[in-house]
Amino acid sequence: MNPQSLPLWVQLLGLLYIGTGVFRLLCHLPQARTCLRSPLMAEGVSLQTWCGLLACASVAFAYAVLVVGDLPLVVSTGCNVAGPILVISSVLRARRINRRKQ
């Protein structure tokens, strides 16, 4: 179906859905920034929790890409994958810096 042929409210809802995914990604930034600025704070972050969130988000992203194929859903779930990856990589980097200092 051509996106232009969709009712305006459906198009707006799709844009809002993309926006929520991007907003969620932005919500992960303070956690990642804290870990990068203060490596000692990264010791208290649960990698198991973030890896679990990444696993769940990855399944949703794969479903969006492989089954649904809806662009707003793909973008939103892709952002939901990027957030945990950002936090996990920040925690791992901070912990590596902590180990070098010791």
Image: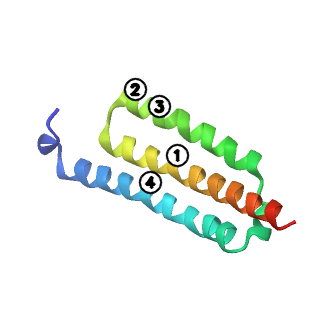
Q: Residue at x 80, y 69 (%)?
A: 40
Q: To which residue does mark 4 refer?
A: 21
Crowdedness near tag 4: few (<14), some (14–19) or many (≥20) residues, C-alpha within 10 Å: many
Mark 3 and mark 1 lie on one chain; the one further toward the N terminus is: 3
The residue lying toward the viewer, choosing from 72 and 38, is 38
The residue lying toward the viewer, choosing from 85 and 8, is 85
Image location (x, y in percent) of residue 94: 71, 62
Kindly indicate whether the residue at mark 3 contacts the one at mark 4 (C-beta within 8 angstroms): no
Label 4 amino acid? Gly
Q: Secondary structure at mark 3?
A: helix
Q: To which residue does mark 1 refer?
A: 81
Kindly indicate whether the residue at mark 1 contacts the one at mark 3 (C-beta within 8 angstroms): no
Q: Secondary structure at mark 1?
A: helix
**Quadrant of the rendering where the C terminus is positioned:** bottom right
Label 1 amino acid? Val
Q: Quadrant of residue 67?
A: top left
**Quadrant of the rendering where the N terminus is positioned:** top left
Image location (x, y in percent) of residue 62: 47, 31
Q: To which residue does mark 3 refer?
A: 62
Distance, label 4 to label 1, CA atoms, is: 10 Å
Q: Residue at x 47, y 37 (%)?
A: 61
Q: Residue at x 49, y 64 (%)?
A: 26
4 or 1: mark nearer the eye? 1
Distance, label 4 to label 3, CA atoms, is: 15 Å
Kindly indicate whether the residue at mark 2 contacts the one at mark 4 (C-beta within 8 angstroms): no
Distance, label 1 to label 2, CA atoms, is: 15 Å
Coloring scheme of the render? rainbow
Label 3 amino acid? Ala
Q: To which residue does mark 2 refer?
A: 66
